[in-house]
Image: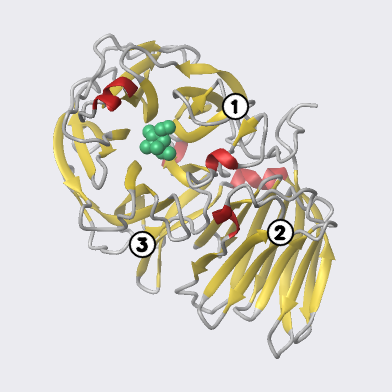
Amino acid sequence: GYYEEPFRPQYHFSPPEKWMNDPNGLVYHQGVYHLFYQYYPEDIVWGPMHWGHATSTDLLHWENKPIALYPDENGLIFSGSAVIDHENTSGLGSEENPPLVAIFTYHDMEKEKGGGNDHQIQGVAYSLDNGETFTMYEGNPVLLNSEFRDFRDPKVFWDEDMKHWVMALVAGDHLRLYHSDNLLEWTYMSRFGEDQGAHGGVWECPDLFELQVEGTDEKKWVLLISINPGAPNGGSGTQYFVGDFDGITFTSEQQEAKWLDWGTDNYAGVTYNNTPGDERIFIGWMSNWDYARDTPTEVWRSAMTLPRKLSLAIYEGEYTLVNYPIEGVADLLVEEKSLKLQVPAGGEVSTELNNGSQSRIHFTSPMEDLSFILKNESGEVLVLKLDPGQGLLNLDRSASGLVDFKETFGRVQQMPLEHLGDGELEFDIFTDASSIEVFINKGQFAMTAQVFPTEPYSELLISNQGSEPVEILQVEVHAVNRVWR
Ligand code: FRU
């Protein structure tokens, strides 16, 4: 049957076949959300990059489309973004039919071998039929480079105050900003970041956007920067900075990195351009360069995170980027049960899961010595363990299913839980055939990880290592409908 292979995600996007990495060109136009992605159509490991393509009207049900962009004489098609050029500033379309313009990195493998710094340059392609077909811009490349070994992943947006386009791209250890009146000629503006945030690896896939701070009139700018390696739990991860952008320079008082997601498997994520109501919707690649090529699937490799709405909140004086599945996900849920559970001191309780590998599990818990364990009939366990002493949530997938394809895969992952207010933790856990996404307090904390259980998890076991009984309230289990027909 269709999409019924072992580990095939049932409500997350995965490519019909072959290798996928970063989401690219996230843009909304005329009722359609586009998802382009780094794609190698010949194998299930990384290779010469194309842009794969899928479309959706709700970000959950996807239609697979033909490959959008193929490598050409300028090189492979690496990551980038897409905009709708409403005023036809580029002249590539018309005001009646504004072009959908993709801005991406060309990577030239021959030049890379040559050892110069000229192998990553930026190019443009455009579509006049809402993404059905693309034409490469004849004047490519639009931004040359001979200075930086890494010079890639342009994210372009329209700056309404300055009335021009801005491009954010990364050059190894810093962000660079450029501006343009027509998307085709770019002028350097400023740089950010050598001395701020995490630098355990190369900076990739920037995104820069403004958000209103929840419950205030204040607006702040948020910069997303993926980094590989150097994430808190190893390999690749996504840090962010909260700051200001004056039209030329991004500044942030923040010295230390903050992390959008503490799990090992949310990388290269960026947000949609041109969404209705200016919603900031994020999609990440649900893998990690540490073992992306080793995961035990055969027909395709890897999936995207659930689409998540980003918002900015202040918790105990600290700006926090909140990320939580879009509201539409609720339409996929089918109620199984709703209960409360009393867990005796030193004891455990368990409740059955009918669709454990395709569930949403919700509950509220105090910050106590508790473990929440997803378990299947083969005894495979995925353990979420609260550590109130250290203020941590640990995710232990070392016995969760297939794990030995890479030695680092079984390492316990930790997420610090700070600024908890009343101390209550509201959990939302989404499991699919090969992933778990844990959200606490509606996205104040997020943790995303791949898992490969050999059969569905069939029970939720809650164990209490403390000396007092604990009540777990508002336990709700939902099956999540599959989205593929
Ligand atoms: C991030 C990344 C990007 C690059 C692309 C190549 O995962 O390394 O920096 O453009 O993947 O596929």
Q: Quadrant of ligand 1?
A: top left
Name the side, left or right, on which 87 lies relative to 438. Answer: left
Residue positioned 63% across, 78% down in the render: 366
Whether residue 443 can be seen here: no
Question: Circle 3 is placed at which residue position?
Answer: 216
Q: In the image, what residue type sits under mark 1?
A: Lys
Question: Cα distance, mark 3 to mark 2?
Answer: 32 Å
Residue 456 drawn at (x, y percent): 79, 50
Where, quadrant-wise, is the N terminus in this rendering? top right
Find the distance from the CA under tag 1 to the CA under tag 2.
31 Å
Disc 2 designates what residue? 361
Please tell me how crowded label 3 is: few (under 14), some (14-19), or many (20+) other residues with Cα within 10 Å.
Answer: few
Task: Indicate which disc, 1 or 2, sits on the residue closer to the N terminus.
Answer: 1
Q: In the rendered view, does 379 fall on the left or right side of 24? A: right
- Please give the label number shown on residue 18: 1
C-alpha gap between disc 3 and disc 1: 46 Å
Whole-percent x, y for residue 321 in the image: 41, 57
Quadrant into which the C terminus falls: top right
1 or 2: mark nearer the eye:
1
| Disc 3 residue type (three-letter) | Thr
